[in-house]
Amino acid sequence: MAGNCFGKLFNLTTYGESHGPALGGVIDGCPPGISLDLEEIQNELNRRKPGQSKIVTQRKEPDTVEFHSGIFEGVTTGTPIGFVIKNTNQKSKDYSHIKDSYRPSHADYTYDKKYGLRDYRGGGRSSARETACRVVAGAIAKQVLKDIKITAYVSRVGTMGLDKPYEELDLTLVESNIVRCPDTEMAKKMEDYIKEVRSKGDTVGGVVSCVIQNVPAGLGEPVFDKLHAELGKAMLSINAVKGFEYGSGFHGSTMYGSDHNDAFNTDGTTKTNFSGGIQGGISNGMDIYFNVAFKPVATLIQEYQTIDKEGKVVKMQGKGRHDPCVVPRAVPIVEAMAALVITDFYLLNKIYQ
């Protein structure tokens, strides 16, 4: 299986399956001499871990990270950082009913066709549990970046969405509720809606928005490795993501150029920021902001029709512990992937200087 590495200079390789003994990763290219707050890395994992609230999967995993190399007395050494997150609460029997059948809109069918076999326990390598490794690497990347601030939040659940731009929101409220929406009133509505959807054995999608502040001008490459292209790839590599837009996004296609152009101030900043902080694939020093759309979780706790390996029509019902809506737990994952991209370009830019 290829495609388990992400990044060029700041590179992450992950391994492990949802119901295997452990997940883990190796981070290569982290600069030496970075004093790490290990407690903050664990806090980031706690934001992603299952069982953290009543509106997410009730799988109980501590998601405690163990570092095996690359860190000495809390400081990075410049050598590969190896880490492990042990699985402690697998219930593989919950998946025995899908051993020979394919769940609709999952990776079951495509994995079987590509590899000739699959680990059906929780989806194996295709499980979103793999993203725990990304959060570890992203937490370290954030500490490399220091003054660059990355904040993601839930802006939509189903048809319920915020109608304010991020500048009008109090982003300090993101962690004040279990939905991770920075609007207290909307957060309560979203929470009630997710509970209602779950009670019906159904699921719902949503949108995670993200803003990256204090990014210096000059990050990104102008042709194939555009900054927004790499951010798009990073976000689209996250499980259940169906769309990515930055800056004015699709709305920008409805505007006139005279309205859309970001006029300059004398100091090089711009009066508007429809560009989303990126022009020509390179950061211009303004805030970078984007939206990431997540589909509804494919596992339904209700009976539905599918096919087995022989192509026969069978009935199935989801079992086990699943999220009725992934977006609350996806917030730290979006931040982590954004941090990996920005750190990679940050280090690349230092080579040019």
Image: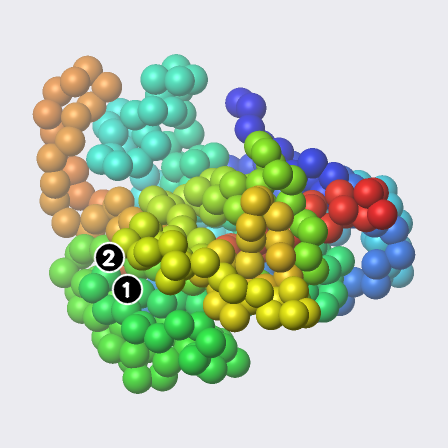
Q: Residue at x 55, y 58 (%)?
A: 277
Q: Nearer the viewer, residue 222 or 297?
A: 222
For the residue carrying disc 2, how many other residues have a C-alpha within 10 Å: few (<14), some (14-19), or many (20+)?
many
Q: Is residue 75 found left or right of 170 in the rendered image?
A: right
Residue at coordinates 19% horizontally, 15% vertically from top-left? 310
Tell me where residue 214 appears, x and y as whole percent.
Answer: 66, 67
Q: Does dot 2 land on a helix, a strand or a loop?
A: loop
Q: Quadrant of residue 191?
A: bottom left
Q: Is residue 204 above or below residue 233?
A: below
- List x then y, in percent, for residue 73: 89, 60
Q: Is residue 250 shown above or below 39?
A: above
Question: Can the viewer see residue 92?
Answer: no
Q: Residue at x 34, y 24 (%)?
A: 110
Which badge, 2 or 1, is on the more N-terminal residue?
Answer: 1
Q: Is label 2 or label 1 in front?
A: 1
Q: Is residue 197 left or right of residue 112?
A: left
Q: Which mark is residue 66?
A: none
Residue 295 x %, y %: 29, 49
Say whether marks 2 and 1 touch (CB < 8 Å): yes
Numbered label attached to residue 157: 1
Disc 1 secondary structure class? strand
Residue 265 placement: quadrant: bottom right
Q: Nearer the viewer, residue 212 or 274?
A: 274
Question: Mark 2 = which residue?
Answer: 204
Q: CA distance from mark 2 to mark 1?
A: 7 Å
Q: Amino acid at mark 2?
A: Val
- Residue 67, horizontal then vertical, whole percent: 74, 51
**Of residues 97 and 152, which is closer to you in this image?**
152
Foreground residue among 102 and 105: 105
Q: In this rendering, would 74 be left or right of 117?
A: right
